[in-house]
Image (tube, grey):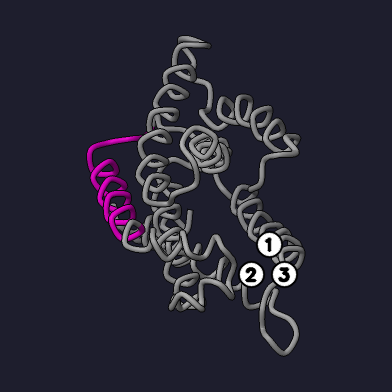
Amino acid sequence: MLGSVLKFNSGPWALPVAACIGGVVATYGVFALSRAGETGRSSIVMLLLTGLAVNALCLSGVGFLSYIARDPQARSIIFWNLGTMSGADWTSVLIVGAATVGGVVLALRYAKPLNALMLGEDEAMYLGVNVARLKWAVLTINVAMVAVATAFTGVIGFVGLIVPHILRLMHGADNRYLIAGSALLGATLLSVADLVARVSLRPAELPIGIVTSIVGVPVFLWLLRKRQYVF
């Protein structure tokens, strides 16, 4: 939309770079605005409420761009909001693949410190983990991976919510297993969902975000209702 308005020809890297910048600004903005007290720590409630406010602000920006867009651009924005892989090509596959593989490799380096963090922040500090640096490092890797993928596929919800918890129920909470397993199982489930989206309403294609939400919401609610399960 901005490329059309500003009259410049954006290359294949413009969208993922812009998405990374926007994702980093929004995420770090949430953390900065949610900090309170002398310790500067963010409570879960403050993080959620601040995240909802920032999300609403960003959605209003997307809504404004949809409002001023021409018909082909507006349709593209709508399908992006619903999630789709119909616009995939080898250039986007290479960009998303490189970001994903690089992000997973970097994340695996922090698997053991993350296992220590599961004991609690104080306990992890006693074990020699720099908790603040660990949080920011993992957060930066996560934001970069998600931003690049979302830039090309749009908003596909609930895959990142349900896949790690399914793996926890199957094989425990060791992050060395969860990080690699989540990448593989998430890709598998997304491929199945894309297949369902393409064949369920042939010759039309159902947005993949609708399929993942239909399946993911009941599973996520079931996990929330399990009293013995701890996120």
Question: Which residue corresponds to mark 2?
Answer: 30
Which of the two discs, 2 and 3, labels the residue nearer the N terminus? 2
Could you tell me which secondary element the residue under label 1 belongs to?
Answer: helix
What is the span of residues highlighted in magenta in the rendered image? Answer: 87-107
Measured along the vertical axis of the image, is residue 30 above or below residue 155? below
Q: Which label was assigned to residue 51?
A: 1
10 Å neighbourhood of mark 2: few (<14), some, or many (≥20)? Answer: many
Picture residue at 59% right of the left edge, 53% below the top: 65
- Measure the C-alpha gap from mark 1 to mark 2: 6 Å
| Residue 26 appears left or right of 35 | left
Give residue 22's position: percent from left, percent from top.
Answer: 50, 64
- Residue 115 seen in the figure: yes
Which of the two discs, 1 and 3, labels the residue nearer the N terminus? 3
The chief SS type of the magenta part is: helix
Which of the two discs, 1 and 2, labels the residue nearer the N terminus? 2
10 Å neighbourhood of mark 3: few (<14), some, or many (≥20)? Answer: few
Picture residue at 71% right of the left edge, 39% below the top: 228
